[in-house]
Structures are given as C-alpha cells and as structure tokens.
Amino acid sequence: MLRSRGPAVGVAMLVACSTVTNSPVPPPASSLDETVFACNVEPILARQCSYNACHGQADFALRVYTPGKLRLNPPMSIDDEQAPLTQAEHDGNFQSAAGFAYGIANTADNFLLRKPLPANDGGFEHKGGAIYTGTSDFQYVAVYNWLAGEGSCAGSN
C-alpha cells in the first residue's frame, strides 16, 4: 500500500530531476603555444624527466618521448631508437604536458611547477628529487611562462 508523501516531497523530487548543462571547456592544449613548448619546455622535460624509470614510460601521467628512450612505436633497430623524434612524438609530449594545465586557476599551482620544486619553496614530494633549484631557476621560469601563455621562441614570429 502506497502512502502519500505530501506536496513538499513531490516538489523536491521534481527539482532533483532537473537537467543540468555545463558549458564545454576547451582542451588545455588549445590555450598553450606548441612552438614555445618545443623551444623552451620540451628540452627541459627531455633532459630532466625522460628516464625510463620515471616519465619515460607510456603509462605515466606525464610521459616524455626522447631518442634512445621511450618511443611511440617500438624501434626495430638502434638507428630507429636514436632517430630524431617524429612529429607524433613531439605532439604526444605537448599533449602530455598540456594536460597538466586543465582546471588550474593559478599557474604557480601547476604540478609541472610545484612537484619538482624543493619543499622549502612549496614543492611536493617528487620521487626524483627536486629538479628546480627554486622559483627563479631558469627551467621553472620557462615552464611557468609557457603555462601562463607567455614566452617566445627565438626565430619564431
């Protein structure tokens, strides 16, 4: 036997079933400059982060393709392994790093900046230790500028 729950319950049920729509959010990469990334940020990631035990693994949140280490397609020879990155690998590096910009209101809070900072500069525990010496480190500044939509690449317009 069903009992009436009264009009307040019926109204609450109607409100709870209303449709909510969210505006589409552009992908983070759409607001970041891929040329500035290639000139200023990708070399830092390749030099500091691409070790096979770290971000040189395809299943890591930040993965970095580099010659001699992680490649998009398994190399068939030593020459393939050492060959310059393909455009797809450059794009993969960009997309991987740009993904860290999603939903970050304050550039300085980005994991690409905070995780590798020393703890006394507001860094988080990074398994590989501090990469930047502080917020004035040229590497930190290059990544910060790219994430903030600033910076330029020598030779680009």
Image (tube, rainbow, N blue to C red):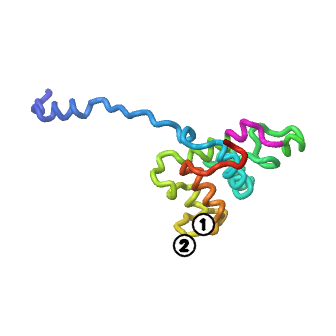
Q: Which mark is residue 120?
A: 2
Q: Residues within 10 Å of mark 2 (few under 14, many from 20)?
A: few
Q: Which mark is residue 146?
A: none
Report which residue position mark 1 lands on. Answer: 136
Report helix, strand or loop for mark 1: loop
Q: Is residue 96 magenta?
A: no
Report helix, strand or loop for mark 2: helix
In this view, the residue in front, 90 or 51, is 90
- Percent position (x, y) of residue 39? 70, 48
Instruction: Name the residue at 48% across, 50% down.
Output: 104
Q: Which residues are magenta?
A: 84-91
Indicate left or right for 20 with 26 as reference.
left
Amino acid type of the residue that numbered disc 1 sits on in the rendered structure: Ser
Q: Is residue 55 above or below residue 138?
A: above
Q: Residue furthest top?
A: 1
Indicate left or right for 11 with 20 as reference.
left
In this view, the residue in front, 10 or 102, is 102
Indicate left or right for 135 with 153 as reference.
left
- Percent position (x, y) of residue 151? 61, 51
Q: Residues within 10 Å of mark 1 (few under 14, many from 20)?
A: few
In this view, the residue in front, 3 or 118, is 118
